[in-house]
C-alpha cells in the first residue's frame, strides 16, 4: 500500500493489522499520507511494536501527549488519541487484542463489515472502504465482500483501497477532486 510516501510506513501497514486499522481510523480531515503515516509515527514514539493491550492500558494523558508531539499524528491529536485508545480497548475486549481477528474470524463479507462497523471510530463508509482494502489489496475476500464494500469494490479510483502505486494515488486524488466539483461524494 504505497500511500504514505515512506516505504517503511507503507510496509508497516501491510505487515501489522493494528497499524492498518489505526491508519484507517486516522483517515479523516487530513491528507491520506498523513493519516496512514500515523501508525509508524506512533510505533516510533512507543519505542516498540504496536500493541492493542499496551495502548489500551496507557494513561490517557500520557498517550495524548505522545500523539501531540510534533509532528502530531493528526490535525486533532487529542480526539484521535482517545479514538485510538477506544479502538484498542475494543480489540482487547472483543478480539483478545488481535487486530487481524476482526477479519480472519469473519466468514462472510457482511459479517466482516459488521465487525468493522462495531469498531470505535468506524462508520459505514469507513467500514466499506476497509472491506475493499482487504479484498483488493490484502487478499482477504470472504464470500460477499464486494457487496459489503460497495461501491468501493468497483473499478473507480475512489479510495485508499484503489492505491497500489504513486500513479494510482494521483488517480484517486483526481477522481475525488472531480466528484467534489460535481457536488458528489466518493460513495456516489
Image: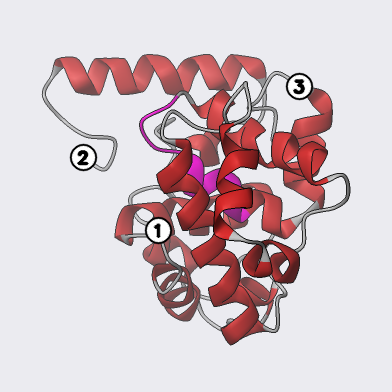
Marked residue nearer the N-terminal end (1 or 3): 3
Residue 145 vs 73, above or below: the answer is below
Nearest to the observer: residue 43 or residue 131: 43
Q: Mark 1 points at which residue?
A: 121
Q: Mark 2 points at which residue?
A: 188
Q: Which residue is drawn at 23% across and 23% down?
A: 179
Q: Residue at x 41, y 35 (%)?
A: 76
Which secondary structure lies at badge 1?
loop
Q: How far apart are marks 2 and 1 (CA)?
A: 22 Å
Residue 144, position in %: x, y?
Answer: 46, 72
Give neighbour class at mark 3: few <14, some 14-19, many 20+ (Cα, 10 Å): few
Give neighbour class at mark 2: few <14, some 14-19, many 20+ (Cα, 10 Å): few
For the N terminus, give its image quadrant.
top right
- Front label number (1 vs 3): 1
Which secondary structure lies at badge 2?
loop
- Front label number (2 vs 1): 1
Residue 17 vs 113, above or below: the answer is above
Residue 127, position in %: x, y?
Answer: 42, 59
Residue 49 in the figure: left or right of residue 91? right
Nearest to the observer: residue 81 or residue 148: 81
Image quarter of residue 147? bottom left
Residue 139 in the figure: left or right of residue 46? left
Say if the magenta span includes residue 103.
no
Residue 73 vs 172, above or below: the answer is below
Amino acid at each position: 500500500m504505497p500511500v504514505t510516501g515512506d516505504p517503511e510506513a507503507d510496509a508497516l501497514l501491510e505487515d501489522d493489522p493494528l497499524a492498518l486499522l489505526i491508519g484507517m481510523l486516522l483517515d479523516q480531515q487530513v491528507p491520506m499520507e498523513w493519516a496512514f503515516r500515523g501508525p509508524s509515527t506512533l510505533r516510533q514514539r512507543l519505542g516498540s511494536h504496536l500493541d492493542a493491550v499496551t495502548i489500551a492500558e496507557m494513561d490517557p494523558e500520557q498517550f495524548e501527549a505522545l500523539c501531540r508531539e510534533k509532528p502530531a499524528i493528526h490535525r486533532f491529536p487529542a480526539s484521535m488519541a482517545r479514538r485510538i485508545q477506544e479502538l484498542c480497548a475494543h480489540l482487547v475486549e472483543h478480539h483478545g487484542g488481535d487486530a487481524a481477528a476482526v477479519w480472519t474470524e469473519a466468514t462472510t463479507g457482511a459479517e466482516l463489515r459488521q465487525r468493522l462497523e462495531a469498531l470505535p471510530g468506524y462508520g459505514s463508509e469507513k467500514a466499506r472502504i476497509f472491506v475493499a482494502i482487504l479484498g483488493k489489496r490484502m487478499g482477504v475476500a470472504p464470500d460477499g465482500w464486494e457487496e459489503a464494500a460497495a461501491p468501493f469494490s468497483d473499478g473507480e479510483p475512489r479510495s485508499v483501497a484503489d492505491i497500489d502505486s504513486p500513479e494510482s494515488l494521483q488517480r484517486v486524488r483526481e477522481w475525488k477532486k472531480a466528484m467534489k466539483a460535481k457536488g458528489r461524494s466518493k460513495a456516489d
